[in-house]
Image: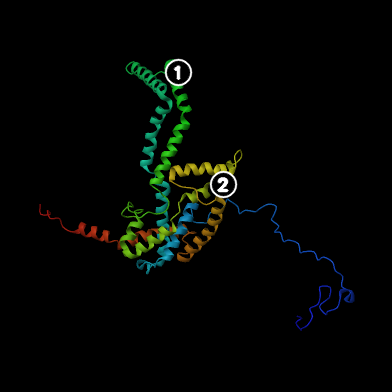
Amino acid sequence: MAVPGTARPSKEQGRAGRSNAETGAILFPVPAPPIFRARLPAVIQYLPLQLALPTGFDSWAQVLTDWRVSRAFEASPFPRCFNAEPELAAPFVAAISRAINDRQLRHLSPELMLLRQRMVEPTYDRAGGPSYIALRNSMEAAQARYFSQHYNRATSLPVELPAEVCDLQTAFFATRQRHAAEVERVERAATRAYWKAHPRHGITDDFFDDAANNSIPAMMARVEAAWWWRSFFTRLQAKSKRHHAADGRLLDALPSLRAQARKTTLAAQIARWSETAAADWGWRVGTHYRRLAEYADRKARSTVAWFDHRAPGYLGTPTIRCALDTRLHQFLTELDPHTRLLGAERDSLSEHWRN
């Protein structure tokens, strides 16, 4: 049954209900719009890897650490002891940054050094076998006979060694050279196990426990209220959770690594440098070096702006920097309760003064 209503124009009719022949329209396929394709540049331009170190900084490790410490300081309440001299915040941040860098880069672990040394001779004995041990004993016996013969006969030893001693020494060191790769592999494995058990990334709860009594971290922890130091230290741990000062050392070494990248690629040079840094400092490679350079450039500008705001001239003028560093140490020494306690004990009379 037909439903009354307006008839729908057919596909052969236009919008006015007339046919295409009457309107003069011509039917033809309309081409689809071209697919948009982003045109990439032929050569991708990267930022320069040889960054300009800001004025007042000795290394990029100092720049990156200062950035983290300053961010933690800004996130914490302003310390009450600095209300009278707020410019002392700049030397305080610099002192905390130096303490972190010294601990992560310059404070080598004697335990690791002894561990690596104890691995050397047992590994040579195991790799060389009985023949190596017999060769070493023969060489040591020949050297002992040589020195015992000339101990009481002449004031100075002859210039040339006997042929027997020379031959044994040559064979001994050639054998050690053949097994040097195995010794190096064992040392690397022991080093990785040590740094896994004693990580140096981030800041642990006992990071400043072994600091000297007259150091800035130790005095500030005693001068300021305990809640403030805990607030600042917690934020510093959060900002430095995955940080290691060797990140900045990589940026410092990039120019020389690029100069050495002739027979090998830059990535190979960086990988070799990173392996040595991981063994010496407990560093593990994180961010790619180009991204690290990009981040470092932005963080450097932010850090310089922070120091200029807190203490104008601290970075650019050595006299101002030295004066503020000295003033900070003197200021905390005057407020340190340990200093007042020791002074009172020193001024008090001894129980045996009459004797």
Name the quadrant containing residue 235: bottom left
Q: Is mark 1 on a helix, strand or loop?
A: helix
Specify the amino acid type for callout 2: Pro
Does residue 118 appear anywhere in the picture? Answer: yes
Judging depth in this view, the residue of 203 and 304 nearest the camera is: 203
The residue depicted at 45 percent of the width and 42 percent of the height is 279
Q: Nearer the viewer, residue 236 or 164?
A: 236
Q: Nearer the viewer, mark 2 or mark 1?
A: 1
Q: Residue furthest bottom?
A: 4
Badge 1: few (under 14), some or many (20 or more) residues near its Cα, within 10 Å? few
Q: How many residues crowd mark 2 within 10 Å: few (<14), some (14–19), many (20+)?
A: few
Q: Residue at x 58, y 44 (%)?
A: 266
Viewer-proximal residue among 193 and 105: 193
Residue corresponding to mark 1:
167
Question: The N terminus lies in which quarter of the figure?
Answer: bottom right
Q: Name the residue under label 2.
A: 255
Which disc, if any, is residue 61? none
Helix, strand, or loop for circle 2?
helix
Residue 173 drawn at (x, y percent): 45, 25
Tag 1: amino acid: Asp
- Give percent across and percent down for residue 212: 32, 52
Residue 293, percent across and down? 55, 53
User: Does residue 52 appear in the picture of this structure?
Assistant: no
Marks 2 and 1, Cα distance to the nearest angstrom?
45 Å
Q: Residue furthest front?
A: 1
Q: Which residue is drawn at 46% across and 51% down?
A: 245
Q: Residue 285: image x %, image y %?
A: 49, 48
